[in-house]
Image (cartoon, rainbow, N blue to C red):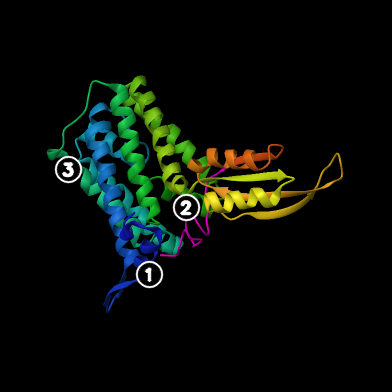
Amino acid sequence: MPAFLTLSSLHHFNRRVLLRTRWGNLTGRLLYHALLIVLGGLLMALSVDIFLDPNNVVPGGFTALAIFANRLWGWRIGITLLALNVPFLILGMKLLGVQFGPKTIFAAAVSSLAIDFLRPYVPTVQGEPLLYTLYGGLLYGLGMGLVFRADATSGGTEIPAKLLEHFRGVKMSSSLLAMDVAILALAAFFFGLAPALYALIATWVMARVIDFLEAGFNAGNTAFIVTGQPDAVCASIMEQLNRGVTILRGEGGYTGAERAMLFTAVNRRQVPILRELVSAADPDAFMVISPSNEVLGEGFKPLTRTRPVK
C-alpha cells in the first residue's frame, strides 16, 4: 500500500498545521473532514436527483418534507431543505453549543445546495423499482456515513429530536421513530402505498451502509481459545498472523484442572487461518470466535477519540 494511503500517514497528516490565520489554524484534520463533508453531501444530492425524487421515494427527514413542498407548491428541494434546517441549526447551536457547530452547518449547506445545482446535469433512473430503491439508499447512506465520519450531521430531524431529548426528556430513538412513521404516512398519502414501501426499503439500506461505514472498516473478530498447548498456539498466532495474544489462567468447571485461555483479535480474512493454526497446534483446543464491531489498538486502527469536540 502506498505510504500516503496508510492509517499512520493519515493520522500524521491530521495533526499537521497547514495554514495559520488570525481566525485559527487550518489543520490536516479539518481539511480531511471538509473533503468528507463535500463528498458526502454530493453523494446525498446525487441519490435524491438520480434515484429517489424522480420516483417519489422519500429518504426521510427534512428531505422528505422538502420533496412534499416541491410537489405541493413547486418549491426547489434544495433551497427548501436548507430553509427547514437553518432555524433548528441556529437554535441547536444557541442552546446546545458545540454539538451543532460549523461542520454541521457546512454539511447541511453542501447537501442542500448540491441537490438544486446538480439537478440539470444528471440523468434519472426510472422504471426499475429494485434498481432505484437500492442504489438510492446506497448512495444516500454512503453520503451520510461520510458526513458522520467527519464528526458532523447533515441536519434534518436529528436536531429537533436532540432538542426534545434535552428539554423534554424524550428519547431520541422514540422521537426519530415517531417522525419517520409520520413521514412514511405522508409519503403514502402523497404518492401511494408502493412508493412509501420502497422508501422503507431505501431507509433500511441507508441504515446498513451507515453502520458499515461507522464500524465496518474497523470491524474484526475476537477469539477465546482454551488449550493445553498454549505455547505452541501462541507461537503460531504471533508468527503466522502477526497478532498479539493475551494469556489468561482459568479453571475447568468439571475437572477443576488449571487451563490456559488465550485471547486474540484478528481481521475477518484471518479467521480461517486462525482455525487452521489452532487445529494444527492443538486438535483438542476449544475456541470461540465472535464478531466485534470495532477493534482498536496495535495492528488495527489507532486508539484515539472518535468524536472530538469541534
**Which residue occupies the foreground of this view, 1 or 44?**
1
Which type of secondary structure does the marked residue at label 3 adopt?
Answer: helix
**Which residue occupies the foreground of this view, 131 or 100?**
131
Horizontal side of residue 225 vs 43, given as left or right: right
Whether label 2 touches label 3, CB < 8 Å: no
- When asked about the image quadrant of residue 129, the answer is top left
Amino acid of disc 3: Leu
Segment tinted magenta in the rendering: 291-310
Q: Is residue 116 above or below residue 243?
A: above
- C-alpha separation, residue under disc 2 versus residue under disc 3: 32 Å
- Residue labelled with disc 2: 163
**Which residue occupies the foreground of this view, 130 or 300?**
300
Where residue 37 sits: x, y (%)?
31, 53
Q: Can the viewer see residue 145 in this picture?
A: yes
- Residue labelled with disc 1: 15
Whether label 3 touches label 1, CB < 8 Å: no
Q: Quadrant of the N terminus?
A: bottom left
Amino acid of disc 2: Leu
- Residue labelled with disc 3: 118
Q: Quadrant of the C terminus?
A: bottom left
Work out whether mark 2 precedes mark 3 in sequence or the reverse, and give the earlier one: 3
